[in-house]
Image (tube, rainbow, N blue to C red):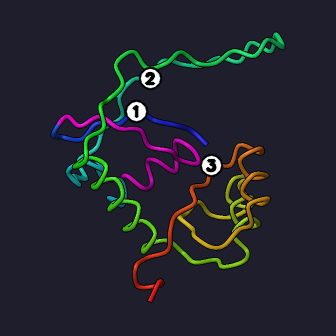
Amino acid sequence: MIVLNLCCDNEHLFEGWFASADAFETQLGRQQVSCPVCGSAQIERRPAAPYVNTGSGVSRQPPAAPNPIPVNADALAAALAMLRRLGKESEDVGERFAEEARRIHYGDSDARNIKGKATRDDVGELLDEGIMVLPLSPDDDELH
């Protein structure tokens, strides 16, 4: 999993999480990457400070961003709307979520957005393996 600094044509800065640089380029080409603030699909990568693992055995955290982007209600609402849209466009793998997330992460399956069900233990194990997952509440339609 890689984290990229991105910017839309309206100069909104945000991060994107992707399985690889190739996955980002593929999604960008398909216009599947959009700004969480304004929805623009005109996105470009911005430089990021590298984090280098020296292997010294000393645990080091990457430096904090010098100027964090303030979160406002409109930006939060836009981000939540984007997550809901991604959820609707994702392949539902049901109870196989943890297994399929691992297959995608390790390159045994095509990179794509998936959704499904996982236990709390499964989510913890995925995160421990470096597989980024995000628990989301069900769609309003699924609640009724």
The crowding category of the residue bearing disc 1, from other C-alpha atoms within 10 Å (few below 14, some 14 to 19, many at least 20), is some
Question: Taking 115 as reference, is 58 above or below it?
Answer: above
- Left-right relation of 67 to 120: left
> Which one is in front, 116 or 135?
135
Kindly identify the amino acid type of the residue bearing the numbered disc 3. Answer: Met
**Which marked residue is nearer to the observer: mark 2 or mark 3?**
3
Q: Position of residue 29 (x, y in %)?
A: 36, 55
Q: Earlier in the sequence, mark 1 or mark 3?
A: 1
- Left-right relation of 141 to 56: left
**Residue 107: mark in rendering:** none
Q: Earlier in the sequence, mark 2 or mark 1?
A: 1
**Which marked residue is nearer to the observer: mark 1 or mark 3?**
3
Q: Is residue 27 located in the magenta-colored stretch of the structure?
A: yes
Q: Quadrant of the N terminus?
A: top right
Q: CA distance from mark 1 to mark 3?
A: 17 Å
Kindly identify the amino acid type of the residue bearing the numbered disc 1. Answer: Asn
Q: Which residues are magenta?
A: 11-29
Residue identified by numbered label 1: 5
Residue identified by numbered label 3: 132
Measuring 20% from the left and 51% from the top, which residue is drawn there?
38
> Which one is in front, 34 or 64?
64
Measuring 62% from the left and 49% from the top, which residue is drawn there?
132
The crowding category of the residue bearing disc 2, from other C-alpha atoms within 10 Å (few below 14, some 14 to 19, many at least 20), is few
Q: Position of residue 90 (x, y in %)?
A: 49, 71
**Residue 48: mark in rendering:** 2
